[in-house]
Image (cartoon, grey):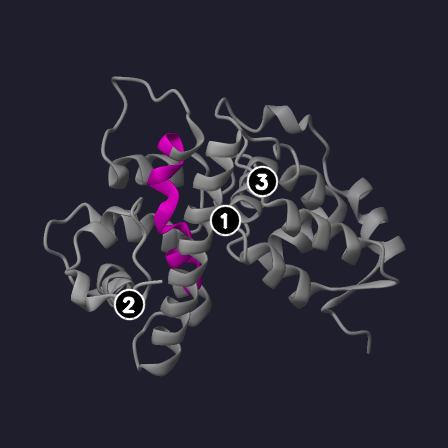
């Protein structure tokens, strides 16, 4: 039986014709979220291999907040009004095809030096917190699945995007990093675990479920001056980079 986690190049590219096509610039009115150049290079190299390992490609995408968000936005848009949007990055890649995922992840890469530094810092912090969330969930008897924990940790920086990327945020829209993150998660139809995370973060002093997981991860992570959760922790609880 063929390995379902491996794409043949021909099959993956032919699959694009089976997915309803639409202009990528019709995603929504917000700008694209940049992926790191090294992520795009590694994605492109894998697409030139004879076969593509779905798990390996998925882990590469999940190491980059921008690539993850761009692909999930496209998958949600392609799904239209359906509630059955792919919840895992593996499902998004399978549904869209690797080529379409590379195209949408690479739609915005040119940033000013200052913007690039901010993106690099926030993306690295999001990845570290995500890895710690998965490790904590994997080591406990919690009801949170380790992969859902990783995605929640990765996207906890969602509400920082308008500031880090210099987006114009309407004055009458939600303010504060949690409210902005919740608005973006809903607008982009991100997986339920992400929307639940920001819903919980709206509750003051919540320290259970997703919020408790994030707090534990931040106590183990390096301090990021841009992350509001880091700012709320006592310095002695965090290791310094």
Q: Nearer the viewer, mark 2 or mark 3?
A: 2
- 181 above or below 215? above
Give x and y (percent) for residue 57: 67, 60
Q: Which residue sits furthest left?
A: 205
> Which residue is the site of mark 1?
65
Left/right of residue 95 with respect to residue 161 in the rendered view: right
> Which residue is the site of mark 3?
79
Principal secondary structure, stretch drawn in magenta? helix
Give x and y (percent) for residue 8: 85, 61
Q: Quadrant of the C terminus?
A: bottom left
Q: Nearer the viewer, mark 1 or mark 2?
A: 2
Q: Nearer the viewer, residue 22 or 131?
A: 131
Q: CA distance from mark 2 to mark 3?
A: 42 Å
Give x and y (percent) for residue 99: 76, 45
Q: Which residues are magenta?
A: 150-163
> Which residue is the site of mark 2?
239
């Amino acid at each position: 039986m063929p390995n379902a986690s491996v794409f043949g190049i021909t099959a993956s590219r032919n699959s694009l014709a089976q997915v309803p096509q639409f202009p990528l610039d019709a995603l929504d009115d917000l700008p694209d979220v940049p992926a790191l150049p090294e992520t795009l290079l590694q994605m492109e190299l894998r697409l030139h291999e004879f076969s593509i390992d779905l798990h390996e490609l998925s882990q590469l995408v999940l190491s980059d907040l921008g690539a993850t968000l761009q692909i999930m936005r496209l998958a949600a848009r392609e799904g239209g009004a359906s509630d059955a949007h792919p919840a895992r990055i593996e499902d998004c890649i399978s549904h869209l095809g690797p080529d379409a995922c590379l195209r949408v992840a690479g739609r915005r890469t040119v940033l000013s030096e200052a913007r690039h530094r901010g993106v690099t810092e926030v993306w690295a912090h999001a990845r570290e917190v995500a890895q710690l969330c998965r490790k904590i969930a994997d080591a406990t008897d919690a009801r949170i699945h380790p992969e859902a924990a990783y995605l929640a940790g990765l996207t906890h920086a969602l509400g920082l995007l308008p500031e880090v990327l210099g987006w114009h945020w309407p004055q009458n829209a939600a303010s504060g990093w949690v409210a902005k993150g919740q608005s973006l998660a809903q607008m982009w139809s991100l997986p339920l675990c992400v929307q639940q995370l920001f819903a919980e973060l709206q509750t003051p002093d919540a320290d259970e479920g997703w919020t408790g997981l994030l707090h534990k991860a931040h106590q183990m992570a390096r301090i990021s001056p841009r992350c509001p959760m880091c700012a709320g922790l006592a310095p002695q609880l965090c290791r310094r980079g």
